[in-house]
Amino acid sequence: MVTNRTAAVMLRQFYLTRGSFSRVLPLFLWTAIDIVLWGFITKYLTTISTGAPFVPMLLGAVLLWDFFARVMYGVTTGFFEDVWSRNFLNIFATPITISEYVSGLVLWSIGTSIIGLVAMVVLASTLFGLSFLVYGLTIVPFLLVLFLFGIALGIFASAVVLRLGPAAEWFIWPIPAVISPFVGVFYPLSMLPWWMQYLSHLLPPSYVFEGMRAIVSGGAASWMTLLWSGCLAVIYILLASWFFTRIYRYAVRTGLIARYSAESVS
Amino acid sequence: MERSPATTKGTSPVAEEPELTIVSTTLSVREVRKVYGKTVAVDGISFDVNHNEIVGLLGPNGAGKTTTINMILSVLEPDSGTIQIEGIDIATHRSQALERTNFAAVYAPLPGNLTVAQNLRVFGLLYGVKDLSKRIQVLLKSLALESFQNVKCGVLSSGEQTRVSLAKALLNQPNLLLLDEPTASLDPATARDIRTKIRELAADGETGVLWTSHNMVEVEEVCHRVLFLSRGKILLEGDPKMLPREHGKKTLEELFITVAREPLSLEMG
């Protein structure tokens, strides 16, 4: 249920975005640059190889991975707005609950990530001929799993910054890059050493990219496997929410919320 | 929901104020204690704020005033003790208690990247204010902020920002209003206007006010009762006009200095 207080969190983000060129542009600029860069790489690879489906395999993977990153940043950037404007005391002294606050960030992220996705799809299809029809109906669970895992990581990352202070945001921006080798965005998981493969099986996006490659290679993605990855992503959301709540309670117990900008981390 | 019967009797009013008929408590703080490591910030304090009453929370820097206010606002958890707002325990029913509360503090300006009207709309929704647009217009007019409503808070002068914070604090017509040095950055004329407004608010409505200030003349003018806090304990409590004489001091400021420098002499006395 969207309460007035959840709507207030979204309205604040809307006001900030509406009036700010520097907030609107990143919604699609970096992902667009990625699409253009990888579009030309796939185009080149197609010319020097013998008919390998690089566009749906590599460009499709880049698009899906950027979508995941966009979802995660959607949540964390919303949270960072309160960090940057030193607004914690004002926000958390209102009747808002933690679930309402986090829900507001998540709902806002849905909006911004859809804008980014539309921009990427238009660019990839018009310039490089990528069609989502290649993936069939499985594109729906693909996007859903990546969306859910992006939300989970966004909530987790926000909790980390709440605990460690404003400077810890620099731990957050590289998270997608750190995860990407483990989830096999550009290569099959079988390429990884055994210990990395173990970690891969704990990460929901691994199943999405394995499924995507299976489809492009003429096979089919396993719906049971996708269902499992969806369940895994939901579990991560629950764990991240639990983690955020624990960090918030710690912050209230120790006075961290009230003195947040002082970075008085013990 | 835990609600306690509201039965606290009032204290004597200050001069120039109408006789108070205080019949209930808006804030009840009981045996509240907060320790940071080995530092006791607040040491088992108890006090009430009644409806229509302005209570001054005084003390030197580090006395525990802001820690106390943060605990009442539920952004800091006491180690022990209870806090009730309108009889509602903030530890168990935080949202319901905070719907009836608001605050303004110099160290908590509203986000500078939103306009005055946008900030008031966002916080109005957070506090569940009914007929929000009308309420915002009333406050903008009342605090002479109409011409700034579409201006970003970050470019306002400190005095204008203080008035915006006060507008936010009054949005939900709170039963309990916490003001941490509300006139610190205001010119004398604006400060007097604000004091008048707060006194009218306390006199006309249901609001009880907890007010911190280092301006003893202001405290004497505004507060019905004061609490002197030192090293986390309430040392003195009473009418700001009577209290200095009761302790052999000429002015409230002299008494304040004694509390700050020689709290033990008052404790023993």
Image: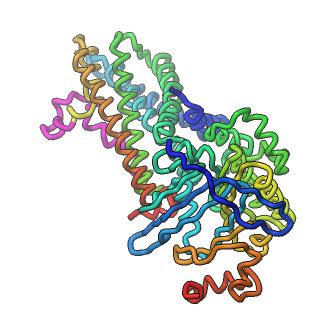
| Left/right of residue B218 with respect to residue A20 in the rendered view | right
For residue B130, which quarter of the picture? top right
- Is residue A87 in view from this perspective? no
Q: Residue sitting at 26 percent across and 33 percent down?
A: A203
| Left/right of residue B112 with respect to residue A86 in the rendered view | right
User: Relative to the observer, which residue lies in front, B94 or A257?
Assistant: B94
How many labels sit on residues? 0
| Left/right of residue B164 with respect to residue A189 in the rendered view | right
Colouring convention used in this rendered image of the protein: rainbow
Give how far across and how far down residue A88 sits, in percent.
Answer: 54, 51
For residue B133, which quarter of the picture? top right
Q: Residue sitting at 44 percent across and 19 percent down?
A: A128
| Left/right of residue A15 with respect to residue B201 in the rendered view | left
Give how far across and how far down residue A122 sits, in percent.
Answer: 51, 19
Which residues lie in the magenta part? A170-199
- Is A183 colored magenta in this rendering? yes
Q: Is residue B268 above or below residue B190?
A: below
Give how far across and how far down residue B231 sits, in percent.
Answer: 52, 77
Q: Is residue A11 above or below residue B202?
A: above
Give how far across and how far down residue A37 sits, in percent.
Answer: 43, 31
